[in-house]
Structure formats: structure tokens, C-alpha cells
Image: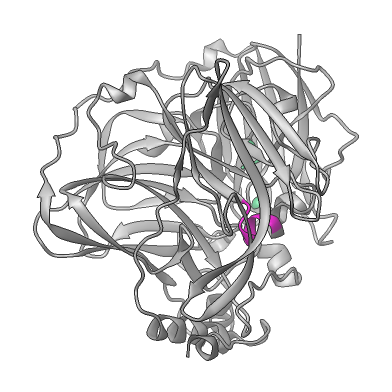
Amino acid sequence: GAASALAIGPLSGCDALSDTRKAATLALDRRPLTIPPLEQGKQISGQRVFDLVLKRGTTSFFEGVQTPTIGINQSYLGPTLQMHRGDRVRMLVKNELGEHATLHWHGFELPASADGGPHQTIAPGASWSAAFEVRQRASLYWCHSHALRRSGPQVYAGLAAPIYVRDEEEDALGLPSEYGVDDIPLVVQDRTFASDGSLVYSSNMQNGMMGMIGDVLLVNGTHEPVFEARSNKLRLRLLNGSNARFYEFAFRNGQTFDLIASDGGLLKRPFRASRVRLAPGERAQIVIDLVDDRPIDLVADSVSNMGMMGGGRMMGMGGIMRGQRGDALRADQFAVLSIVPAEDRRKGEPLPSELTSFAAPDPALAVATRRFVLGMGMGMMSGFTINGRSMNMARIDERVPIGQWEIWEVENASMMAHPFHIHNAQFRILDRGGRAPPPLETGFKDTVVVNPGETVRLLLRFEQNTDPELPYMYHCHILEHEDAGMMGQFVVTT
Ligand code: C2O
Ligand code: CU
Ligand code: CU
């Protein structure tokens, strides 16, 4: 049965890894894509209130196999939390995990006390309330654990959920917007299962360096799912919710699609593309047309984030070890979603040629420049640094005046690519290695890949001022790197 198909034992050999994937694929019937339930909260005296419980449970990812997991209001991941720009939101978070946890609203500009970072720890059995106004543009955001040194294992076990922000500007465009029908969140995560069905989170040397790389791909917690499409136009909201793996998404038949949004909202116009690359924490929205009755498959190539191979395809322990044995490097390709057109389908409106407008980022606005150098030394727990320092809760690394336009220069002095994420901001990318950014980086971003040896220049300002001593974070979104110290703290001062 499936249980024996999953019998890969500990992460010992490379062959075991590739065998698992093969076996898992063969043994399993394709399941319908799980659509996270839509949760819009309750309106209570002018606030949109969400009741969220962090809890443990078991999830059946594979027929006849129960996997211990954690989730938000459910056993694995959480509902899609939907809100509107301008809403006043209150998040009531109860921690029933039996361990310390936090819940961070990734991509949101909000008071530091509501951020859900390592300083907003929720003790076991305790509750935490976060109130903020939704200032974000319509887009896909997400929430996840940000517990100090525990983000990796907690997110891996399931502590994350998608967030939809909608707004009037976007509503007026007539984009595919029917949740679960033609507007679909896809939370993409790689996982490794042990023979007893439990998730394997391994923090050995290899994972410490690479981050936790799994060998099975889950989408909204479903392995190799099928989705029946009742519209010829589908909007897919991709979130790389993996701890460490980078992906390049494409349709197996080579079909092109329209790229319409990045992390923090719509791009100026749709961009025709055939591939889209996302590092952990990054999002992209694409619109795909079904042209006939044939199923189409969304696949993901695993992308190497190692220096020498930047831009190459190969990652994961299996691949690397094969490489070390002298074989040719080869793609690690995953099935993401098989889209099966239903017999009866609505046509779908053509996309507008213009989606939104915003000014080009103007470096002349900046009155200060800060520099951040990402480093990986040799000592595993001391080697992950920003500007030579490892995360320290008691140290404020940067003091940034409120409302001040700044350029943040992020340089990668290590041999791996890192997705650099900044809290409390949606920034713009001025240039990458001195060159203009590609289409997906022309809009609003909160997480940006910095390749080895490269410098990326960001333009940003912080508009939220709260407790001048309570910090926000910036960090690598490879969660094992974050947990190992590649994180710093800034306060917004008046
Ligand atoms: Cu998505 Cu500081 O996190
Ligand atoms: Cu964040
Ligand atoms: Cu990193």
C-alpha cells in the first residue's frame, strides 16, 4: 500500500530519495486539488475579525496514511483569509500547539506590535490579538510562523495560510475572481515523508546549508492534484511556500500565459511569459487560457540556487549527490497541477491591456542608502549573517526615519542565492546587477532573490510608525537560513 511506498527511512542515501518520489507517484491516485476554505471573518463593530486557532492534527496526504501536522483552524495549513484594502482587521490567534509560536502577516505594512514576528510570541495555551488597517494593494499575501529559530520546522509542519487582499481598483478590471472556480491559490511546498507517514524535518549539515529540501511536492497540501476547470480563463495565484526550494513554473505543453501580479499587487500590464521563477516567500499571479478540451499540466523545475549553477536546473540532495558521483546534472521536475477542462465552460473575458498605473521608481527620491551584505561562513550556527552579524533579539541593527525614501543595496557575498525579505514594506526594484529588472520585478515586491555575487538595489520607505523600540525584521526567506541567524532588526523612528 501507500505506506510501504513511502518507506524511505531516514535521509540516508540518495537513491532512497529518488525512489520515494517514483514510488509515491506510482502508488497514488491523483487527488482533486484542495481549495482552502474561504474565511472572510466576522464584522464586529467596524472591524473584520478573524478567529484563528493554531492546532495540531493529522492529515491524510496519501491514501491510508496519517501524518501528524499543524495548521490554522484545520489540520494542515489554514483557510484563505480574505479582506479588503481599507478594512480594519483584528486577528485573534489562539495557540493550542503546546509550544511557542507566532503568526506573521507577510507583505503587510502594519504596526510592529501586530507584525507577528519573533517579538510577538504566543505562549502555549495563550492568545494574541493583532489589529491593523489593510493598506496593501489587492494581491496574494500569506501568514506563517515566525518563531525565533523555529520558523522552519513550524512552517514545514503546516503553520501557514494564504491571504487574499481585494480592492475596488482590481474588482473593476473583470479579472477571473471567483474563488476556487477561476481564481485559485496554489501554495507550493516540498516535503519528505518517513516510512510511518510522518514528515521528516532534518536539520543535518546538508539541510543546514541548503535549507530543508523535500522530495515530494504538495500543492495546498495535495500531492499531484487535478483541477477541473469550469472556465476557459483561469487565474492561478502561485505562492512558493517551501522552506528552501526555488522553482520555475511552466506548462508542459509549452503554452504561454499572462503574468499579471507580483508579491504586492498587479503589474502595469499583463506580460506574456512561458516560465515564472519563484523563491521561497515570493508570489506571482498568472492567467492561462484553455484553448481546447485537452488537459494541461503545470509543472515546476527545481532551480539550483548554488553559485556556480545560478540559473541552472538542479537542486536537492539527490541531484547534488548524483552530480558528485559524476553523472550529468539533470532536472528535478515536479508535477504541480493537472488542469482538466470540464465539458461546460464559461468563456472568460479578455484581459485588459492595462491593469494599473504607478510611477517608475525614482532613485533621486532617496535621501539615504543602506547596505546589507549577506554572508555564509563555515560554522553552521554562526555563519549565517547580514553585515557580518547573526540575528540578536536584543540588538537593533538599523534605525530608519519614518517616511524617508531610501535605497537598500543588498549584496550577496555567499555562494548561494538568498530571497531577501523586508517586513512592513512593499518595495520597488531599481536594478539587479546594474540592469533593469525583469517584468515580474517591475511592480511591488516584498521578497527579492539576490544571486551570488550580485547587488540588488531597492527603493522603499516605511510609513508605519509604532513603538520606536519594537523592531521589524529583514531576513533571508530560506527558513533554515533565517532560523540560523540570517536576519536583522530595524525600527522606524520619528
Ligand atoms: Cu514571510 Cu519575516 O517573513
Ligand atoms: Cu514578512
Ligand atoms: Cu539564505
Q: Position of residue 252 (x, y in %)?
A: 26, 65
Question: Is 132 situated left or right of 274 in this image?
Answer: right
Q: For residue 107, which quarter of the picture?
A: top right
Q: Position of residue 190 (x, y in %)?
A: 53, 65
364 over 92 or under it: above or below: above
Q: Quadrant of the C terminus?
A: top right
The reply to whether residue 387 is in sight is no
Residue drawn at the location 39% of the way across and 62% of the way down: 300
Total labels drawn: 0
Frontmost residue, 235 versus 316:
235
Residue drawn at the location 27% of the way across and 47% of the way down: 181
Residue drawn at the location 33% of the way across and 47% of the way down: 180
The reply to whether residue 381 is in sight is yes
Question: Is 343 situated left or right of 433 in this image?
Answer: left
Q: Position of residue 420 (x, y in %)?
A: 62, 41
Magenta span has 492?
A: no
Question: Is 173 situated left or right of 77 in this image?
Answer: left
Frontmost residue, 62 versus 359:
62
Frontmost residue, 297 versus 244:
297
Dominant secondary structure of the magenta stretch? helix
Q: For residue 408, which quarter of the picture?
A: top right
Residue lying at the far top in this picture: please name it: 494
134 over 215 or under it: above or below: above
Residue drawn at the location 72% of the way across and 42% of the way down: 94
Q: Position of residue 442 (x, y in %)?
A: 40, 30
Provide the residue span drawn in magenta.
Answer: 154-159
Q: For residue 346, which quarter of the picture?
A: top left
